[in-house]
């Protein structure tokens, strides 16, 4: 059985290796419309979430983010353990940097001592950049499930973490200034996320399958907006590369998800390999960058289509209407110069966003559509097709 699974995986994936410091990879990841989720689901019990995930996306399962469990499992609070434990930040529910503290320098020193130890390979130090007990319930349940039942049909495992711009714009100091604008705070935030990326990728790689690690950073929509004129594109790319580099260093595939319109060249020009966008609401922004998308795909990049709506449009759609919408969008990209064969081979399917704020019934509906559309498309284009 295991030999057959290994043969199937070998046909569909090649080893992903870095080639220098850029986004060039020695081998190509060609998922052929493999379906996976974004991350969050509206359950309190991990068992319910895992049932839905393995039932709907068994070939690319993801661990479930469970924001309804509380602040330590929420989008912002989940990735802050090392920052809170070292005292540079407080409160999972309303996190803020403690820059006003009289011993701020000592707190920063504690953080950097921990970070440098983890970076140098100290596994005990690295553990502090993982999840807290409550915050890690989704991942731990996912791992226990694999250890008890195996990886089954899975060809790849998916993890996710919150991105630096979104966290940096939401987390402030005592003066309510966004931490992303304060260099020392931004640097600690990015380094903490990067070490978490190393920790989580390593954890999932232990199960012997390729790992896609997605940086969820919806705050990237703000780059170029009049309300955020001081956000610097080159700095953001450097920060994303710091995180992607840790994922690649552990043998993972770095991705990014943004469920809003943005300047997609930020991701195309970074070390990110998989760009996951809301193809239902924000297709126009991708169409105008068809030339840049073609270059990204030519370098081995993958486009993840968030084609299953997670908003009010959900009740107006079914498998047939979503398939037609997808095909129309593909044809328009091809008309604008994107190679169709390459695009289809280097595509994933996802919901347009996470489902953590929705009802369980809506999540079931979304994952059901994702399963139906993914099965239909994968029959037409085998994963790994050249």
Image (cartoon, helix red, strand yellow):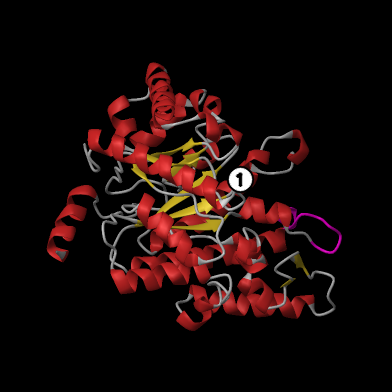
**At x 74% / y 80%, what residue is drawn?**
106
Residues packed near mark 1 inside 10 Å, few (<14), some (14 to 19) or many (20 plus): many
128 or 151, which lies in front? Answer: 151
Residue 318 as seen in the image, left or right of residue 357: left
53 or 162, which lies in front? Answer: 53
Q: Secondary structure at mark 1?
A: helix
Does residue 11 lie above or below 330 as drawn? below
Residue 12 as seen in the image, left or right of residue 46: left
Does residue 281 lie above or below 249 as drawn? above
Residue that carries the numbered disc 1 in the rendered image: 218
Q: Is residue 181 magenta?
A: yes
Residue 41 as seen in the image, left or right of residue 159: right
- Residue 204, position as x, y percentages in the image: 38, 66
**At x 24% / y 37%, what residue is drawn?**
379
- Residue 370, position as x, y percentages in the image: 41, 42
Q: Is residue 375 magenta?
A: no
Does residue 375 lie above or below 321 as drawn? below
Q: In which quadrant of the rendered image does the N terminus lie? A: bottom left
Q: Which residues are magenta?
A: 173-182
* Magenta part, dominant SS: loop
**At x 73% / y 59%, what residue is drawn?**
171
């Amino acid at each position: 059985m295991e030999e057959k699974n290994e043969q199937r995986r070998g046909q569909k994936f090649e080893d992903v290796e870095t080639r220098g410091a850029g986004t060039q990879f020695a081998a190509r990841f060609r998922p052929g419309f493999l379906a996976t989720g974004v991350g969050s689901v509206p359950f309190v019990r991990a068992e319910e979430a895992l049932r839905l995930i393995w039932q709907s996306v068994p070939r690319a399962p993801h661990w479930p983010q469970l924001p309804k469990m509380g602040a330590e499992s929420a989008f912002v609070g989940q990735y802050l353990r090392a920052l809170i434990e070292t005292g540079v930040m407080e409160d999972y529910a309303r996190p803020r940097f403690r820059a006003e503290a009289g011993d701020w320098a000592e707190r920063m020193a504690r953080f950097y001592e921990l970070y440098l130890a983890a970076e140098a390979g100290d596994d005990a130090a690295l553990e502090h950049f993982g999840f807290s007990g409550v915050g890690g319930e989704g991942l731990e349940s996912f791992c226990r499930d694999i250890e008890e039942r195996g990886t089954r049909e899975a060809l790849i495992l998916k993890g996710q973490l919150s991105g630096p711009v979104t966290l940096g714009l939401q987390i402030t100091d005592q003066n309510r200034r966004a931490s992303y604008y304060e260099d020392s705070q931004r640097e600690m935030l990015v380094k903490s996320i990067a070490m978490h990326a190393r920790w989580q990728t390593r954890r999932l790689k232990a199960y012997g399958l390729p790992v896609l690690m997605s940086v969820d950073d919806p705050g990237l929509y703000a780059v170029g907006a009049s309300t955020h004129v001081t956000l610097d594109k080159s700095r953001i790319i450097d920060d994303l590369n710091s995180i992607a580099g840790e994922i690649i260093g552990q043998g993972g595939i770095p991705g990014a998800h943004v469920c809003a319109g943005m300047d997609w060249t930020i991701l195309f020009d970074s070390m990110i390999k998989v760009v996951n966008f809301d193809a239902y609401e924000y297709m126009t922004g991708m169409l105008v960058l068809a030339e840049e998308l073609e270059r990204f795909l030519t370098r081995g990049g993958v486009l993840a289509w968030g084609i299953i709506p997670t908003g009010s449009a959900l009740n107006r759609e079914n498998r047939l209407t979503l398939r037609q919408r997808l095909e129309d969008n593909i044809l328009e990209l091809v008309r604008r110069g994107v190679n169709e064969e390459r695009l289809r081979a280097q595509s994933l399917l996802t919901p347009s966003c996470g489902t953590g704020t929705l009802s369980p019934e809506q999540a079931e509906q979304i994952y059901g559509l994702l399963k139906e559309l993914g099965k239909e498309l994968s029959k037409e284009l085998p994963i790994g097709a050249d």
